[in-house]
Image: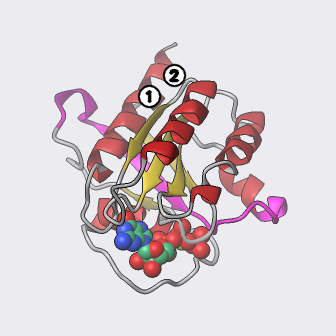
Amino acid sequence: MRGQSKIILLGQPGVGKTSLFRRFLHDEFRDDYHSTLGATPEPTRPGWSTAPDLQGHGLMLWDVAGGLDEPRLLEPRMRGAAGAVLVSDLTRPATIAPLADYAQKLLALEPACALLFVLNKDDLSDDRARQSQEIARLADAFAADHLSTSARTGHNVLSAFEALARAVRAQEES
Ligand SMILES: Nc1nc2c(ncn2[C@@H]2O[C@H](COP(=O)(O)OP(=O)(O)OP(=O)(O)O)[C@@H](O)[C@H]2O)c(=O)[nH]1
Ligand SMILES: [Mg+2]
């Protein structure tokens, strides 16, 4: 993986895709919610990760609107993705299962795309055993990793993108 790998954020509306994108790229967080319109690709800065094995590996992040009901919009944005963060909301367990649909649609277009499943908003609740189990099962079904994150506190946000960058590289080397 040299140059920039296209990474797409996928998941139901309001799970925190834009918030993870902003926390990761700009280290900021906003409480207000504005549903994303259109796609806004943005690159990582040089040196975004200090991990020795990721030096020179840039990411181009695509933040897209949540929802599976407009495949004509979603599919062109999925095309060319080397990696995807599949985001769910810890406080809304119903946002977990649809990630299987996003993953299947994506892999139908980009079979070698690396996946990372995320349970976001982990600052909001300690009661997470069931959700963690569900996301772990889903990730296992796609032979992918999973993490809980908080865009609000920043917990695991950098780690999530580093893990995905490594998974992208592993896919490219296989
Ligand atoms: N407490 C908390 N709130 C969060 C977190 N991430 C996102 N939010 C809030 O959840 C709401 C939705 O976040 P967005 O990042 O806009 O969600 P999205 O997935 O981009 O939504 P769409 O663009 O509609 O698909 C906003 O009010 C955010 O402030 C988090 O980790 N913790
Ligand atoms: Mg958004």
Q: From the viewer's perspective, is 106 left or right of 154? A: right
The residue where tag 1 is placed is: 167
Query: As drawn, is 137 to the left or to the right of 69?
Result: left
Q: Is residue 57 found inside the magenta-colored segment of the image?
A: yes
Q: Position of residue 152 (x, y in %)?
A: 30, 69
Please tell me whether mark 1 sits on a helix, a strand or a loop. Answer: helix
Q: Tell me: 166 left or right of 53.
A: right
> Looking at the image, can residue 104 be seen?
yes
Q: Nearer the viewer, residue 123 or 25?
A: 123
Please tell me in which quadrant of the rendered image residue 69 appears.
bottom right
Identify the amino acid type marked 2. Answer: Gln
Packing grade of label 2 (10 A; few <14, some 14-19, many >=20) is some
Give the camera-side residue of 85 and 99: 99
Q: Few, some or many C-alpha atoms within 10 Å of disc 1 (few <14, some 14-19, many ≥20)?
A: many
Name the residue at 53% across, 58% down: 62
Q: At label 1, which amino acid type do we have?
A: Ala
Where does residue 19 sit, x and y in percent of width and height? Answer: 41, 69
Task: Tell me the residue that label 2 is attached to.
Answer: 171
- Identified at 27% across, 33% down, the residue is 54
Tell me, yes or no, if residue 6 can be seen here. Answer: no
Q: CA distance from mark 1 to mark 2?
A: 6 Å
Q: Which residues are magenta?
A: 51-73
Q: Which of the colour schemes (rainbow, by chain, secondary structure, one colour) is used?
A: secondary structure
Quadrant location of the N terminus? top left
Mark 2 residue element: helix
Left or right: residue 162 compared with residue 168: left
**Percent of width and height locating residue 174:** 52, 13
Assess whether mark 2 and mark 1 are in contact (beta carbons under 8 angstroms): yes
